[in-house]
């Protein structure tokens, strides 16, 4: 779910908005008898670029607003104690 929200959804959001607009514009043009927009004439490089930009912005916001502070403690890696693996922690 995290991968979907952090990577896939921001990347596809501009394209989904464009496809929704084309769908509504096609329905409207059929009702009015005008020419419908074509998907092949879409701004695909701009959609891909804006999707990539949204992913970069999303990852930057997550990186700056989450996680522990650098002085949270000393990292203790996972270790083997008394026949069991002790998970990593900060002390």
Image (spheres, rainbow, N blue to C red):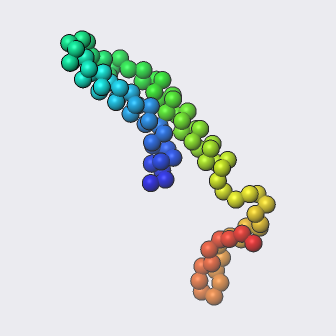
Give x and y (percent) for residue 16: 38, 33
Give x and y (percent) for residue 69: 74, 57
Image quarter of the N terminus: bottom left
Q: Is residue 60 above or below residue 73?
A: above
Q: Is residue 4 above or below residue 53?
A: below
Q: Residue at left 66%, top 50%? A: 65
Could you say which is closer to the camera, residue 27 or residue 76?
Answer: 27
Image quarter of the C terminus: bottom right
Give x and y (percent) for residue 27: 24, 23
Q: Residue most toward the bottom?
A: 82
User: Residue 89: which quarter of the image?
Assistant: bottom right
Could you say which is closer to the camera, residue 65 or residue 7?
Answer: 65
Give x and y (percent) for residue 6: 51, 46
Q: Is residue 37 above or below residue 47?
A: above
User: Residue 9: which quarter of the image?
Assistant: top left
Q: Is residue 85 above or below residue 3?
A: below
Q: Horizontal placement of 20 versus 60: left or right? A: left
Q: Tally the numbered discs.
A: 0
Q: Horizontal placement of 2 versus 28: left or right? A: right
Q: Residue at left 48%, top 23%? A: 46
Q: Residue at left 22%, top 14%? A: 32
Could you say which is closer to the camera, residue 83 or residue 15?
Answer: 15
Q: Residue most toward the top?
A: 34
């Amino acid at each position: 779910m995290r991968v979907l929200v952090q990577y896939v959804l921001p990347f596809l959001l501009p394209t989904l908005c464009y496809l929704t607009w084309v769908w509504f514009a096609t329905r409207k043009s059929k009702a009015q008898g005008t020419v419908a927009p074509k998907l092949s004439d879409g701004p695909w490089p701009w959609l891909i670029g804006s999707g990539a930009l949204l992913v970069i912005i999303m990852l930057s916001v997550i990186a700056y607003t989450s996680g522990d502070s650098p002085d949270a403690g000393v990292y203790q890696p996972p270790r083997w104690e008394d026949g069991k693996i002790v998970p990593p922690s900060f002390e």
